Every structure is written in structure tokens, then in C-alpha cells.
Image (tube, rainbow, N blue to C red):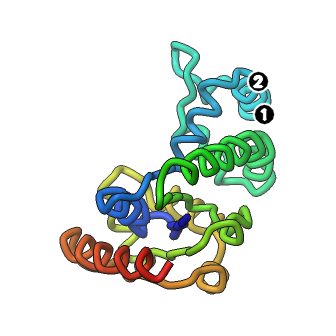
Amino acid sequence: MIIGVTGLIGSGKSEVATEFERQGGNLIDADEIGREVVESDQSVLYRLVLEFGNSILDSDGKLIRRQLGRLAFSDQSKRDMLNAIVHPPLLTLLENRIRVSEDKFDHTIVDAALLIFWGCHTKVDYTLLVHASKKTRLERLKRKGLSITEFNYRNKAQLSLSELKAGSDSVILNEGSIRLLRQKTTKLYVQITENG
């Protein structure tokens, strides 16, 4: 069974996906695959530098993801270009990882903010949307050092809540403590996997 976990920035989707992993699922993190694509495929990094300039690289020639994000999310055309460069190899690798996981594990967890944007929710058995209010999400990300401007750019770039709900099988609300979220998540994992 493949379970997709998605949510808006700051919703806590990765915490839910990690808890699903603790319950026995094999976790595949789309963000990690994105990092891997950029670090292992020099042609991808080269195209990003051509498009966004040398300011996205540190002194060792490694990608500064936060700087790339600042540049890409502030402009729709730049964001489209980032997606055009990174998403095709990312999706190829993601699909390969899912196939391998399916052969080895009973339950595969796909942690991906863009799961529904990519249309991958149609390829998984169950899609869970993790949701929290904009105020809660902003507070969480401010604690991690993200500015209000950066948050607004990134939040605006994502699908609307109604679009996310339409592509999901269920929604888990994450407005409380980590402990409460873990309790909810553990219970839900049992429900999903037993019914699946």
C-alpha cells in the first residue's frame, strides 16, 4: 500500500510522515530526492546556475537552497523555470523509489508537498492532507527563521486548500502539540493500513 502525505508549508506533514515511518512504513521524502537530484546531477545544477546566477552557490560550489528559494518563489516565471529544471528528474527518481519500495515493504509513505500538484495522488492508494491554519503555519516557520515575506511567497505558490482537499482521501488537523499529532497519526495509520 502506498500512502501519500501532503500539506501546505508549515502544516506538519513531514512530522506525520515520520510518525507513519515509526509505525512501520518505508518513508520516501520528495524533498530529499530533490536535494539528491541537484547534488548528483551536474547538468541540473548547471542549468540552475545559468538561470538564477552564481549567488545560489556557496564557496564550495554547493547549492544554497534557501537562496534559490528566495529567487524562485518571488517570481512566477522563475518558479516555473525551477520546476521545469528540477521536477522531471525528481519525478523519475521518485517513481523508481516507489516501485522498489513496493517490492520490499507492505507500506510505503510518500512525503511530498507537491503530491497533488504533480498528479501523483492518482498513483497512490491513499492521500492524507495535513492541515493547519495560516497563522499557525506562519508561527512555526518564523521559529525556523523564515521571514513573513518568504512565507507569503511560498504559501501563495502552493495549491489552494480546496484543491488539496479535493485530491485527498482525508484531512488531519495539526493545531496542537506534537504529542497530540503523534497520537492522532498513530490511530490513523492503523485505520488506513487495516482498511487498505
Of 172 and 161, nearer the camera is: 172
Q: Quadrant of residue 68?
A: top right
The kind of secondary structure element at disc 1 is helix
To which quarter of the image does residue 119 belong?
bottom right
Q: Position of residue 8 (x, y in %)?
A: 52, 69
- Residue 191: where, in percent of width, then height? 38, 82
Left or right of residue 147: residue 186: left
Q: How far separated are the C-alphas under marks 2 and 1?
A: 12 Å
Residue 153, above or below 144: below
Image position of 96 with respect to 57: above or below: below
Identify the mark at residue 51; answer none if there is no mark: 1
Most extreme residue toward the top is: 60
Sequence-wise, the earlier of marks 2 and 1 is 2
* Residue at screen point 52% across, 13% down: 60
Residue 20 in the image: above or below residue 32: below
Question: What is the crowding at mark 2: few (fewer than 14 residues within 10 Å), some, or many (at least 20)?
Answer: few
Q: For residue 43, which numbered disc appears in the image?
A: 2
Residue 106 point in image, percent of width and height: 47, 60
